[in-house]
Amino acid sequence: MPTSVASALATWLAAITPLPAERLAAAEALGRTLVDDVVAPGDLPAFARSMMDGYAVRRAWAGQEVALAAARHAGDDASLALPLDQAMPIMTGAVVPQGAEAVVPKELVERTASGVRLPAVIAARANIVDIGAEARRGATVLRAGTMIGPLALAALIALDVPTVLVRRRPQVAIRTTGSELCAAGPLALGAIRDSNGPMLAAMFSELGQVAERSSIGDDADALAALIRGNSAELLVLTGGVSAGDKDHVPAVLRDLGAEVLVQGVDQKPGKPLLLARLDGRLVAALPGNPLAVHWCCTAFLAPALRALAGLPTIARRVRVDLGAALPGSKERPWFVPCAITADGRAQPLLPASSADVVGPATISGYASVAAGAAPLPAGAPIDLLLCGAAAWTCA
Amino acid sequence: MPTSVASALATWLAAITPLPAERLAAAEALGRTLVDDVVAPGDLPAFARSMMDGYAVRRAWAGQEVALAAARHAGDDASLALPLDQAMPIMTGAVVPQGAEAVVPKELVERTASGVRLPAVIAARANIVDIGAEARRGATVLRAGTMIGPLALAALIALDVPTVLVRRRPQVAIRTTGSELCAAGPLALGAIRDSNGPMLAAMFSELGQVAERSSIGDDADALAALIRGNSAELLVLTGGVSAGDKDHVPAVLRDLGAEVLVQGVDQKPGKPLLLARLDGRLVAALPGNPLAVHWCCTAFLAPALRALAGLPTIARRVRVDLGAALPGSKERPWFVPCAITADGRAQPLLPASSADVVGPATISGYASVAAGAAPLPAGAPIDLLLCGAAAWTCA
């Protein structure tokens, strides 16, 4: 009796430990996960900064006409204090001069012959970002476990953090197996193109992960040599994992002493999925049927990448209404490829078989149909597990 | 009176025409949008394919014991027909021999001394994927306007489609402006690091777009020369677009004869946003405040990339409950950075100012607060516009 998807996933993720840390220049850390808290090395801003184009003033001048000092722009020399009797024209981003108590925006003053007339009320520190308002020196600004997106990258650069300790990225190797795979030239009867290798590499690429790939035949010794020589933290095999008499993967893995975590999952597509660990490295042996490969990568490999990075693995499901009826499932839990159409509805794209990637070519995610579930009519709400970077990223 | 976000976005997107087409090898077309329908160049599968590991049989043998021919694997020579008196052991993916009427799975037969005993009932074509079941030669398999994701890529490869006509990718150039920007070395008083350039490049990278970047000062002539010499289809400027007396961007663009599509948007952050077109190229002049840059890229540049690719631009908003109160807005519509926490709730991360990227460093999207809107309590549902590849991709 194969295990359930939920139980297989839990077993698989529990066997994954986050990769070791490495130190990177902050500017190179996009997409990485922080291993340590990041502490601000200095105050940000490091100087009182004008938020507006306007005039640096003393509050006592409210309602009065004042003469103007030389203007100050962002990046200008900022050594001069505010004169005792002149407002200083100041631009957004410039250093607020010593002695100034507020910045009055351009549009709130009246230009006069000799200067400006200020408004009757001027609030203290108005339009001034004080030193340390965004981050105090020594304060924790980003927590361990945070994935560095574009804004966090900007924060690290603005804070002048030189380096960060982050999770190393895994090496991922894809090996498609099967002597029916033909890379180029005319196809002999029974030969097919290797669509699984490029599809998996594309899926990893969408997840921000480089994956190296090649194809091998059906030979058990070659397979054993490949697995023995593997140095990738995640080795992905396709094919050779089922009940056929050239399906050498399960026996080869056991012979090499791999710890088989999952063999067989109660799912359609992808029932023969085998997940193992060998010498601290992960091996995912996927069936050869391309749609099964896509589902297994979506449901098991995408969260594995997050677990290797030390990120939480909570599936992001989106609730959408069915645009057409969804058939029930007789035996196994069925994961039905669905497109999201322009009206925001889910359109099941039923494959001709688990090998069919043409019918489901434009899907956005998968609907789950439990074993024995009755059909659902158009209009019924369903939860889709999204494909690609949109899934598993919610928390 | 600045224009609304919705109206500014509509004006901007209406001014964008999809880029010209180019022909690429199908294997290179990941992430591209099809300009033409793709037609299957041949039947897929090209041969009747076994879906199971089992036995190729004639239906008349149901319930009988039959001897076995030599086994056939995926990729094996497939010239031999099914013998008149022997079942053929056959593996998943192999060519079903001439004369076979079904494949009986391994687990449904009984092994005998001289062969196998077949089940009493054998359905016609059981476990056989017939020629053309996934795609008939000449059938349209992918429509113009489809973005090629991993599954569509696999379909193109499986179908042996050699090349596809797709939208060219835009050239994107980022130019951060401001003499306060300091690339390296100690920061003088008033100088800051350029966080906008790396942040924008990272945002484009997450959207699958390479962007080239550099930084320039505040000189009007240099700015004019830059814009005049620009060959990128999308030129993104930051800074110099507001009311300061070194804010040369609006005047320079007008002097060069640019068509200003939008100048000033009723939004916080990013009110000074200027969107223009010059010689058929797009110019987006963003304010210099980093959070404003992030919002303007999320709301205006991400959909522009889709429009350039000929893709629909429907914002994907997700409904989540607030994990903390959301303040109201006095004057302008306010786009509030929000993280999604592990419990799936939206946590507003209020910035110290429109320059602050430290406070909002870990957000997933933006909540919209209308001008004059009252505060919302924790627990109230809100719609988030997601950042990154997850937004704008729904249809």
Image (tube, coloured by chain):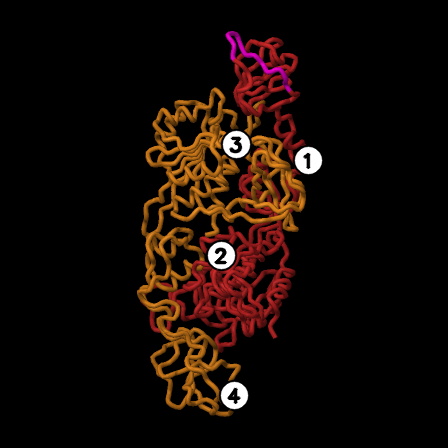
Chain colours: A orange, B red
Rounded to the nearest angstrom, the CA distance separating label 3 from label 2 is: 42 Å
- Pinpoint the chain carrying mark 3: A
Q: Which residues are magenta?
A: B111-122
Q: Nearer the viewer, residue B173 or A63?
A: A63
Mark 3 neighbour density, 10 Å: few (under 14) some (14–19) many (20 or more): many
Residue A111's mark?
4
Q: Which residue is mark 3?
A: A194
Query: Element under label 1?
Result: loop
Query: Element under label 3?
Result: loop
| Label 3 and label 2 in one chain | no
Q: Which residue is mark 2?
A: B345
Q: Residue at x 50, y 74 (%)?
A: B247
For badge 2, the amino acid type reads Arg
Rounded to the nearest angstrom, the CA distance separating label 2 from label 1 is: 46 Å
Query: Element under label 4?
Result: strand
Q: Nearer the viewer, residue B100 or B261?
A: B100
- Residue A183 locus on image (x, y percent): 51, 30
Classify B225 as above or below B115.
below
For badge 4, the amino acid type reads Arg
Mark 1 neighbour density, 10 Å: few (under 14) some (14–19) many (20 or more): some
Q: Which residue is mark 1?
A: B139
Query: Element under label 2?
Result: loop
Q: Is residue A290 visible?
A: no
| Mark with earlier residue (2, 1) | 1
